[in-house]
Image (spheres, helix red, strand yellow):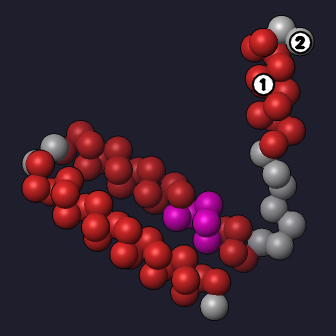
Amino acid sequence: MMIIMIILSYAILGFADLKATFQNQDKAKLRVYFVLMTLSFVIATASGYVKNMPSPADPIKHIVFTLMGK
């Protein structure tokens, strides 16, 4: 059921956003849009299947603290 909801959500949002992008005739934005939508769809689908997906919070926290010098 979760996968069906993910697919429907991406179809609705993708159609609404894609319509505006096609009207602007901007090919570079269209390529970036497809890459980011595909990446986010894969992550959302994987999170629907995998129950114990690791959280990226600790690595992000480590990177931020390293950059901040703490």
Residue 1's disc is none
Q: What range is drawn magenta here? A: 41-45
User: In the rendered view, does 43 fall on the left or right side of 63?
Assistant: left
Q: Nearer the viewer, mark 1 or mark 2?
A: 2
Q: Quadrant of residue 13?
A: bottom left
| Position in image of residue 54 (x %, y %) | 84, 55
Element assignment for label 1: helix
Q: What residue is shown at x 10% (from left), y 56% (from top)?
A: 23
* Whether residue 53 is situated above or below residue 33 in the rendered picture: below
Pointer 1: residues within 10 angstroms few (<14), some, or many (20+)? few
Does residue 44 show up magenta in the picture?
yes
**Which residue has dot 2 on it?**
70
* Whether residue 10 is situated above or below residue 31 in the rendered picture: below
**Which residue has dot 1 on it?**
63
Three-letter amino acid code at the position of disc 2: Lys
**Residue at the top extreme, as displayed:** 69
Three-letter amino acid code at the position of disc 1: Ile
Magenta span: predominant SS is helix
Does residue 20 show up magenta in the picture?
no
Q: What residue is shown at x 41% (from left), y 50% (from top)?
A: 35
| Position in image of residue 39 (x %, y %) | 52, 55
User: In the rendered view, does 69 fall on the left or right side of 35?
Assistant: right
